[in-house]
Amino acid sequence: MDENQAVDDTAFSKDHDTASRTICFDIFTLFPPMFAGPFSESILKRALDKSLIQVLLHDIRSYTTDRHHVCDGTPYGGGGGMVMKPEPIVRAVETVLAHPTGWTLPPEAAFVDLPPWDETTPAPLPADVPVILLTPQGRTFDQSVTLELSQHPRLALICGRYEGVDERVRSQLVTDEISIGDFVISGGELAAMVIVDAVTRLLPGALGDALGAHQDSHSAGTDGLLEGPHYTRPHSFRGESVPDVLLSGHHAHVERWRREQSLLRTLERRPELLDTAGEKLSKADRAFLTDRNWNPAYA
């Protein structure tokens, strides 16, 4: 078997601890109902049912004390759009993170019976809980960031809205900023769903196949490359048949075919990932790629 084809037990155990782990996601949003659908289906629902994850939705508006429960205002200096005010966000996050994992504000306490909070003095926050603002200005979310976040027992995700959040939320509260891509969506809620889903997949027991997440595109099991094609029944569909090697029963040949298909797909679609893989590419990998006119950037 090629040196790249055998499952690297060391890498797998590093990326997927076999010990039971749980993560609590504290999500701060103006629109909690948006999360009902995604978190009540499929892998996330099973992870919740198995107590692998805990998702707590905190309504930022519940932490306002003015008559109209205003959470946004016009920007100083003019310009289009509205800006989320700092007080409700900071009060919500500091109040929640001051309590043990799993705490939420009782519905009857919203607006009128909030826990004490000092507007003038920052509250001490747990050092091991990243406070993440979801913004198109943040660092790009990828599989390495997913793995990094999965090591924390608790994550605080702030969903921005409108034109953005007051800069003092960034300077006084936020410890990290994450973007799910170079585009703009209406708010951070969808980004929060993406992060919860991606991180949950890395938890032991979240997927039916223990190797599933390890062998995904961009993961350690593929050396950060793209996965090759997959096939299932029927053997032939509209004149296109399953490659013979997958029916051969020769495991070494199957694994080498899969590796080559991974290399080929990456070369065609994301060639920069081959440069990132670097020394993880074997001599056989390099020979295969060279035959297909690969020109490594680091050569």
Image (cartoon, rainbow, N blue to C red):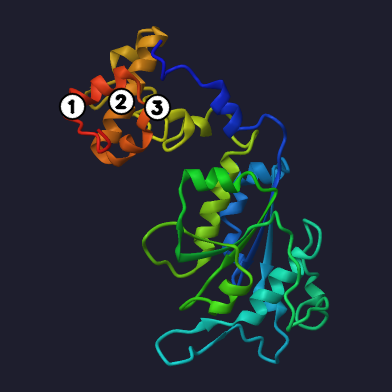
Tell me if I can see residue 242 in this picture. no
Which of the two discs, 1 and 2, labels the residue nearer the N terminus?
2
What label sits on residue 261 in the rendered view?
2
Expressed as whole percent of the image width and height from the top left, the position of residue 221 reads 47, 28
Check the image and report above or below for 263 versus 197: above
Locate the C terminus and report the quarter of the image it occupies: top left
Residue positioned most to the front: 299
The residue shown at (36%, 25%) is 231
Locate residue 259 relative to residue 137 in the image: left or right: left
**Count of marks overlaid on the render:** 3
Tell me if I can see residue 14 in this picture. yes
Mark-to-mark CA distance, 1 and 3: 19 Å
Residue occupied by mark 1: 292
Task: Assess disc 2: are there few (<14), some (14-19) or many (≥20) residues with their C-alpha within 10 Å of its C-alpha.
Answer: some
Check the image and report above or below for 119 versus 137: below
Of circles 2 and 3, the one toward us is 3
What label sits on residue 262 in the rendered view?
none
Can you tell which quarter of the image residue 159 is in? bottom right
The residue shown at (33%, 28%) is 262
The residue shown at (71%, 31%) is 19
